[in-house]
Amino acid sequence: MLSAGPTPRTRLDRWDSVVEGEIDQPRRWTWEEFRSLPVEAVTKDIHCVTKWSKFDTSWTAVSVDTLLAGVETSAEYVVAYCDGGYTTNLPLEDVIGGKTWVAYEYEGEPLEPAHGGPARLLVPHLYLWKSAKWVRGLELLIADRPGFWETLGYHNRGDPWGEERYAGD
Amino acid sequence: MDAEELRLDGNAAAGLLGEVFPFEMTTAIGTCAGCGRAQAVGALVLYRGGMGAVLRCPSCDTALIRVASIRGAHLLDLTGTTCLRIPGEA
Ligand SMILES: [Zn+2]
């Protein structure tokens, strides 16, 4: 995923993860709290819109289903926002149901800042720009709000199997 | 697991910007929407990767210019530039 900017380095004691927006009460986890959430070992292929794929990548991650457990919302969209200002938008359907995670280890090692550490979104069923590096929060939205690349001609959803690369595909 | 991305001097964007603008863009003065600093486009920081090119303010990292080249077209976003001063013929 190409964030096209400097690599943020947020200290873990200043890091938190937030779910907000169309939700009765915003949710927030410190790094310690986040690390105590149930984890999953995830092995998935990842696909970049610039036409490379990497197979069987393995991650330690918290399911977004865990972050959203019990949430009642009328939202249909989510924007992931990140240190460094990057954003990407997703239909809520694409982040629930065991398809999307917040990952903090790659191949058994803490996720390096260059690859999105301390934590990044992992959306393996969509193109890699949706797997936002340095993710800090999810905002639940009634109306869709296209993100960094989606506002610059890239596809709003980015399904690799539908070859949804660019707006209009 | 991520693609390589180059961090370059803004002057390295001269070729790309020359395809978009009919004048020498690297000497144009852009005012940053983030911090208000005015500086030559060539003095910005260019991040060039497979999805597009982004020129950022060296002071506050605001993206002043974003360009994606998609299917023979250039898509340009200048929302991070509040004013662009283009030198004319004297
Ligand atoms: Zn600035």
Image (spheres, rainbow, N blue to C red):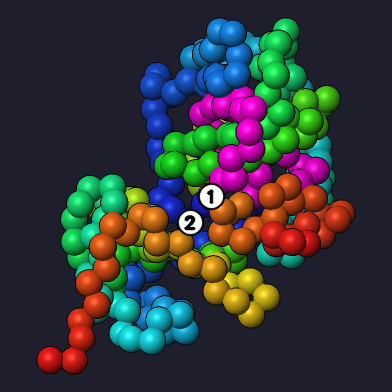
Between A35 and A125, the one nearer to me in the picture: A125
Mark 1 neighbour class, 10 Å CA radius: few under 14, some 14 to 19, many 20 or more: some
Q: Which residue is mark 2?
A: A4
Q: Is residue A154 above or below residue A121?
A: below
Identity of the residue furthest to the front in this view: A143
- Give the image location of residue B41, x and y in percent: 29, 70
The residue at 26%/62% (across/down) is B83
Choose top left, top right, bottom left or bottom right for residue A124: top right
Mark 2 neighbour class, 10 Å CA radius: few under 14, some 14 to 19, many 20 or more: many
Chain where mark 1 sits = A
The residue at 48%/56% (across/down) is A4
Q: Are marks 2 and 1 in contact (CB under 8 Å)?
A: yes
**Mark 2 to mark 1 CA distance (whole Å):** 10 Å
| Magenta range | A122-147
The C terminus of chain B lies in quadrant: bottom left
Task: Identify the element where label 1 is drawn.
Answer: loop
Task: Identify the element where label 2 is drawn.
Answer: loop
Is residue A95 visible in the rendered structure shown here?
A: no
- Give the image location of residue A10, x and y in percent: 40, 32
